[in-house]
Image (cartoon, rainbow, N blue to C red):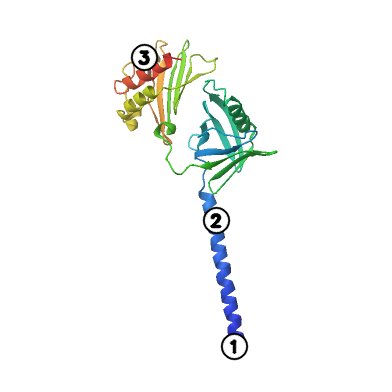
Amino acid sequence: MKIITILLSVIALNSCGNTKAASNMQENLDAKKTETLSGKYIISNLINTEELPEDIHLIFDESTNKVSGYAGCNTFSGNYTIEGNKIKLDSFIATRMYCEDTMEIEQNLMNALQEADSFSLENMELSIKNENGILLTGKKNTTSKISQKEDLLIEYKAISRGLFQSVTIKGNTILVQKDRSSEPQVRKCTNEEIASIEKLLAEITLKQLENLEAPTKAHQYDGAAGATLKITKKGDVFRTVTFDHGNPNKKIAKFVNSILKMAELQ
């Protein structure tokens, strides 16, 4: 009888142990499933680089499939696509400031991103790799939220048969393209420009953008340039109907004029 009791106790203990192990394994799997690439990563290691500048980082936004970052002197942005653990990063544009101390580091970072073909993300540690090994690693930043300007994308476009103008503001970077065949001109916004844009944006009810009527509609019949304003904030997209370039609805006129004034400084 004692032997039977001992055997039953051993079986019960093993069962509990197996259940607990299975539970822990499931918790780990569930945790991995909830990890998403979106977020800011402070780069801790970069191929061919011994010492990294402060706050060199990447920001992934899964709602727009955009990647942006700071490379030590210049900011940059591009596109990315993922399928399983495969990743492709391309279409990069960057500001063009010259910083002698960080130029080689910035080139190493851009090379790493363009040569990457896979990634892993575990316990908030991101590794970007290719067939030769790890190109860079970064730790997800959870101590501070991404600032509003890093989570904001402003796009203004004006198009007609003889005119093309595109103005994009992402983070503290403005990109201006003045014809279809040219590359965008890129520069850093000043603190005053960013403060002005954020102030004017706060005066706009984004959910009402699509309902704002165009004051005039010359673009519909006499070849005038038609313009649109698109604002992406925290993954939500707000856009206007097409209006005549140079004559937006009065509720967004100050905001649009401010963007166009910034574009003239390129």
Q: Is residue 241 visible?
A: no
In the picture, the disc for residue 167 is none
In the picture, the disc for residue 2 is 1
Label 1 Cα crowd, 10 Å radius (few <14 / some 14-19 / many 20+): few
Q: Secondary structure at mark 3?
A: loop
In the picture, the disc for residue 246 is 3
**Separation of disc 3 and disc 2 at Cα?**
55 Å
Compared to residue 46, the image places residue 172 above or below, namely above
Disc number lying in front (1 or 3): 1
Which image quarter is the N terminus in?
Answer: bottom right
**Separation of disc 2 and disc 1 at Cα?**
39 Å
Which amino acid does the dot numbered 3 rest on? Gly
Q: Is residue 233 visible?
A: yes
**Relative side of 130 to 68, left or right:** right
Which amino acid does the dot numbered 1 rest on? Lys
**Rendering coords of residue 233 (x, y %):** 40, 33
**Mark 3 vs 2, N-terminal side:** 2
Q: Secondary structure at mark 2?
A: helix
Residue placed at 52% from the left, 53% from the top? Answer: 31
Single out the residue that lies furthest toward the right: 132
In the picture, the disc for residue 28 is 2
